Image (cartoon, helix red, strand yellow):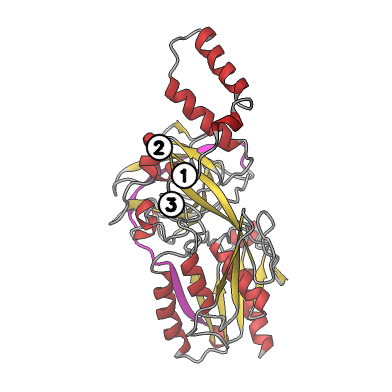
Amino acid sequence: MKSKTWMTALGIAVAVLLLAGACSAGFVAGWYLQPQSKTGTAGNVLLSPQATVDPTDTTSLFKPFWEAWQIVHDYYVDRPVNDEVLMQGAIRGMIAALGDKHSSYMDPFEYKDATADLSGEYEGIGAWVNTEGDFLTISEPMPGSPAEKAGLITGDQIIKINGEDMTGVLPELARRKVLGPAGSTVILTIQREGVETPFDVSVTRAAIKVSSVDSKMLENNIAYVKVRNFGDQTDEELATALKALMKNKPTGMILDLRNNPGGSLNTAISVASEFISNGVILYEEYGDGTRQTHEALQGGLATDIPLVVLVNEFSASASEVVAGAIQDSGRGTLVGVTTYGKGSVQQWIPLSGNEGAVRVTVAHWLTPKERLINDVGLTPDVEVKTTDADIKAKLDPQLDAAIKFLVEKK
């Protein structure tokens, strides 16, 4: 079954994989959308609990809980029980009971692993992956990477790593298990849509280097720029690419946000501002009813050129911020299929006593026309699907449609 989840890079050799130390990145360990006004990110942030609950208000409410706690201690067959594990399980169950797939609990070991410093050079299989579903999912193998050579494709779910079942394991932690020294081998058990039985794929890791922005000139003097994520260097990379492209005096431009998981909100605003000269980029709406407005920055390099934005079901979070702002402002035309629909903001809040952290959704973001896209996504102006047959034949009908649209617009 195809999983619509977040993605980041496996084996990426740049600092976009930072977690705690680079919380300004909206997807900092799996790339999440970040608020500017409130401390923290929509993914990972180190905060302290801001409020306490009056125990007198919960005495009656928690009476059954403590009764169950005592029953376990008095009657469970394998005594003594581990109180710390019970406590962690209670927190995990409480967060799970919210019914929010983006809120979760990490025990101390998971939290330490997830917030370890990942700066420097990294090695892995070379694939963009989603890290917000039940399993780590391949979103796009990097060209020429070990993942591509091993035959991994978009939508592949990694259900085991070296024989270890990944059921219940946070996909971000699973991603780390896939990372490893160049030359070493990792065995991935894959669940693939249309294939009844899971199968193993052996991948030899390598040193991976990747840029978050690719650009080139296409036929009919159309400029093309692909933004793969919204990392710390993306806005600078995009500005460099746009300066080079605009020297060709293109008649139109295609911004490709397909398979883009999102990233830093700051970066998303910077990227959107390269194409939108003024106005609202997005609103953030918090649980207490407060709202923050984020507007376009000045000095965009491509604010007048005819624009088409390519999106698909893996365009998520910060990429939806950019696409939604462009669509609502009438600045460009969206081509492709409905986007993922990640319109919420998360914070990671560590618990006292080094007992891990809680990741909780704290806000929703809305498009300039105040559309709430969470679990809905953005509907493209021109719907164009890409079939399995297209992929096998190495055809790109969405890109073709974007080119045609711009040519006819002249």
**Residue at x-position 54% and y-position 7%:** 75
Mark 3: few/some/many CA within 10 Å (<14, 14-19, 20+): many
Which label lies toward us, 2 or 3?
2
Q: Is residue 87 visible?
A: yes
Could you say where residue 295 lies in the image, as x and y percent from the top left?
56, 75
Whether residue 384 is in magenta: the answer is no
Q: Please say whether residue 152 is visible from this viewpoint.
A: no
Q: Quadrant of residue 343?
A: bottom right
Q: Label 1, on which residue? A: 49
Towards the viewer: 196 or 106: 106
Q: Position of residue 57 (x, y in %)?
A: 60, 32
Estimate the spatial distance between the alpha carbons at disc 1 and disc 3, rounded to whole Å: 12 Å
Instruction: Return the residue nearer the eye: 231 or 73.
Output: 73
Q: Secondary structure at mark 1?
A: loop
Which amino acid is tagged 1?
Pro
How far from the left and from the top, in percent, is residue 296? 54, 78
Residue 67 vertical position relative to residue 266 in the rendered view, above or below = above
Q: CA distance from mark 1 to mark 2?
A: 9 Å
Sequence order check, earlier mark of 2 and 3: 3
Q: Report whether 279 appears left or right of 29.
A: right
Q: Which stretch is magenta?
A: 195-218
Q: What secondary structure is marked by label 2? A: helix
Q: Is residue 217 magenta?
A: yes
Pointer 2: residues within 10 angstroms few (<14), some, or many (20+)? few
| Quarter that holds the C terminus | bottom right
Q: Nearer the viewer, residue 103 or 17?
A: 103
CB of mark 1 within 8 Å of CB of mark 2?
yes
Pointer 3 residue: 45
